[in-house]
Image (cartoon, grey):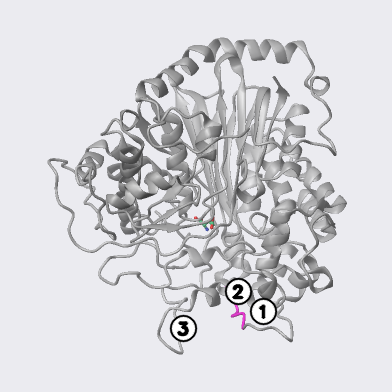
């Protein structure tokens, strides 16, 4: 579907957006009933053409019986097949994620971690699993300080090292999600991905470009070079990429369970690899040894967390609580925006407010959010509407604030318009890695799942003979406080989870799912999710339009990042209000879905970013 970027003045008044939401509300109950009848009337397996080899790669598909959206058609096909065979959204999400470990190995896989957000139709509750990587017990606040200089390590020396590898949480996340809410065994959920790894997939331009961008560091690690640089070069576009080691790893994990990693032979291999990265004799880099021990793996567990919650213009937005900053920051920014009528504004003013709300929310994020097992995160106050009002009154409708703006004081009482004082922190780094997927089933269960190995290509360290890369998630810690006068909640500590920006989000209306959305992109994940929600809920866009719209990202930095497609008139008008724009060629790669009237589901992926994503429903129509 071709979507032209919204032009200034094109945005509809808020009434239209509200009516769209209301239409959904009215159609929902009747629609689900109709869908249930249809599902009952026709066996799903025969109601949809075989999505085998010629599975279409489209960014939008609407229909019935369940949906999957991911960045990759092979992975989406795997998830859809699980739904067609009667699996639920959790089964489909895990199977899709495992397939992404094959086709998107630089962003996802069992060497990393993530956050799983789930709406359970039966209990009508949103649950979440924090499957973030943890720091080994030998890690301290100064582990990323170079003893030779007393200064923080150069960032790339942190990335390309065993030091950055956190204890992986992804296998434990899959196991926990399936055990709690799924119907498949781990083995059944991993089987299609194992087959895909053995059979291979066709290399596209994105995979080739990502490999080429990593060529120099991949070349330094023997098993990474052997796997991802066959013949010393990135695989050619159109060639078939097979990963028999990963196929075997998935099969063995299905057979032995995740304890094979957390307490068994695979774990010992991971620890050995982290402590002595298999560096090539002709390597250009020094890969520092990591601190992980087998006891770190044995102690790992996922954390069940209550989701964050923000009520926004009649809907309820559920997100991921710390250790991710995603849910709180998206929620606080929405609360700030709820104080104004975005849909009634012209496009320039609406965009200005979106950027200013994000700037303020990031100031608070950077000051207050870290792993709650180590830091007292004021989660409720940060999401209090009274606090949002205090923050909102700092926004000048005619003029951009100058970053870094200071954080607010989220503690009650909330009154007036207290000027924030002191120093603020900009978000220092944003990557473009990670992946996000959504799945929904015919029973109305919904999953939004972000998984990552941090940087595209993670630490560049492949576990020999196992076919997967290890993460560099611990570089998400601050190596040292960015501003020594501002307390930093995100310094490394033994067993701590580095702060994340991942923001898998599920929106309910009247207690029923309305939409789910999420994205990769480091700290830009938060702004991508926020901008998509604002586009859909305030600015009269459909979900596909909201995903396709040109993106801007302000994270309490001096400059606001803007995609090249941001219209020139909007750019000029924002600059006239004092915004400094810096071009970012591509922000995010979102996936989403929405429950439409009459029981239809719309699966949505990117039309062009990262080469375009793959959205599918069980029965198009
Ligand atoms: N490590 C990042 C986070 O947890 C995600 C990686 C990325 O998207 O660049 O926020």
Give the prevailing secondary structure in the magenta stretch: loop
From the Cβ of disc 2, is ligand 1 less than 8 Å away? no
Q: Is residue 139 magenta?
A: no
Quick one: label 2, few (<14), some, or many (20+) residues within 10 Å?
A: many
Number of numbered callouts drawn: 3
Residue found at x 77% / y 63%: 466
Q: Position of residue 347 (x, y in %)?
A: 36, 37
Q: Position of residue 69 (x, y in %)?
A: 64, 37
From the Cβ of disc 3, is ligand 1 less than 8 Å away? no
Between 570 and 149, the residue placed more toward the observer is 570
What residue would you read off at disc 2?
A: 162
Quick one: label 1, few (<14), some, or many (20+) residues within 10 Å?
A: some
> Would residue 271 appear left or right of 517 to someone viewing this image?
right
Q: Position of residue 15 (x, y in %)?
A: 36, 20
Q: Position of residue 587 (x, y in %)?
A: 51, 51
What residue would you read off at disc 1?
A: 276
> Would residue 326 appear left or right of 449 to someone viewing this image?
left
Disc 2 + disc 1, Cβ < 8 Å: yes
Mark found first going from the N terminus, 1 or 3 = 3
Any part of residue 390 in sight: yes
Any part of residue 186 in sight: no
Residue found at x 36% / y 25%: 13
Quick one: label 3, few (<14), some, or many (20+) residues within 10 Å?
A: some
Between 189 and 214, the residue placed more toward the observer is 214
What residue would you read off at disc 3?
A: 146
Quarter holding residue 241: bottom right
> Disc 1 vs disc 3: which is toward the camera?
3
| Residue at the extreme bottom | 148
Quarter holding residue 403: bottom left
């Amino acid at each position: 579907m071709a979507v032209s970027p919204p032009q200034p003045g094109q945005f509809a008044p808020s009434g239209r957006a509200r009516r769209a939401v209301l239409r959904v509300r009215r159609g929902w109950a009747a629609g689900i009933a109709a869908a249930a009848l249809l599902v009952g009337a026709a066996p799903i397996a025969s109601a949809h053409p075989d999505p085998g080899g010629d599975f279409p790669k489209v960014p939008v598909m609407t229909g019935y019986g369940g949906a999957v959206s991911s960045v990759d058609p092979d992975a989406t096909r795997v998830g859809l097949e699980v739904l067609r065979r009667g699996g639920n959204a959790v089964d489909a999400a895990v199977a899709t994620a495992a397939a992404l470990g094959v086709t998107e190995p630089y962003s996802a896989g069992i060497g990393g971690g993530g956050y799983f957000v789930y709406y359970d139709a039966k209990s009508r509750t949103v649950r979440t699993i924090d499957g973030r990587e943890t720091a080994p017990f030998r890690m301290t606040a100064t582990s990323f300080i170079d003893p030779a200089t007393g200064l923080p390590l150069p960032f790339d020396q942190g990335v390309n090292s065993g030091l950055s590898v956190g204890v992986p949480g992804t296998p434990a996340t899959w196991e926990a999600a399936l055990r709690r809410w799924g119907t498949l065994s781990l083995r059944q959920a991993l089987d299609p991905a194992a087959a895909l790894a053995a059979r291979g997939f066709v290399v596209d331009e994105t995979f080739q470009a990502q490999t080429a961008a990593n060529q120099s560091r991949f070349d330094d690690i023997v098993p990474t070079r052997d796997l991802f640089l066959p013949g010393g070069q990135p695989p050619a576009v159109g060639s078939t990429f097979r990963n028999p080691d990963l196929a075997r790893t998935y099969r063995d994990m299905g057979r032995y369970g995740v304890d094979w990693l957390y307490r068994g032979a695979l774990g010992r291999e991971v620890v050995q690899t982290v402590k002595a990265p298999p560096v090539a004799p002709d390597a250009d880099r020094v890969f520092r040894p990591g601190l992980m021990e087998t006891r770190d793996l044995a102690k790992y567990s996922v954390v069940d967390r209550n989701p964050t919650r923000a009520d926004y213009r009649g809907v309820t937005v559920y997100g991921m609580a710390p250790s991710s900053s995603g849910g709180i920051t998206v929620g606080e920014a929405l609360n700030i925006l709820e104080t104004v009528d975005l849909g009634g504004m012209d496009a320039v003013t609406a965009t200005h407010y979106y950027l200013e709300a994000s700037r303020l929310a990031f100031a608070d994020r950077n000051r207050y959010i870290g792993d709650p097992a180590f830091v007292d995160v004021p989660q409720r106050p940060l999401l209090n509407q009274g606090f949002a009002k205090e923050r909102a009154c700092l926004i000048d409708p005619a003029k951009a604030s100058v970053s870094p703006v200071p954080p607010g004081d989220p503690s009650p009482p909330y009154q007036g318009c207290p000027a924030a004082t002191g120093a603020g922190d900009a978000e220092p780094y944003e990557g473009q890695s990670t992946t996000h997927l959504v799945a929904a089933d015919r029973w109305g269960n919904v999953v939004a799942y972000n998984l990552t190995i941090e940087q595209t290509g993670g630490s560049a360290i492949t576990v020999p003979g196992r076919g997967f890369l290890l993460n560099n998630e611990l570089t998400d810690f601050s190596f040292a406080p960015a501003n020594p006068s501002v307390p930093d909640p995100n310094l490394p500590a033994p067993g701590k989870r580095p702060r994340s920006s991942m923001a898998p989000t599920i929106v309910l209306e009247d207690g029923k799912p309305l939409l789910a959305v999420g994205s990769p992109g480091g700290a830009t994940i938060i702004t991508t999710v926020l901008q998509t929600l604002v586009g859909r809920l305030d600015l009269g866009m459909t979900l596909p339009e909201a995903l396709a719209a040109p993106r801007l990202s302000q994270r309490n930095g001096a400059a606001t990042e803007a995609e090249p497609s941001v219209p020139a008139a909007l750019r000029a008008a924002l600059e006239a209000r004092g915004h400094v724009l810096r071009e970012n060629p591509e922000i995010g790669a979102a996936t989403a879905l929405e429950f439409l009237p009459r029981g239809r589901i719309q699966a949505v992926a990117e039309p062009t970013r990262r080469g375009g994503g793959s959205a599918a429903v069980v029965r198009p129509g």
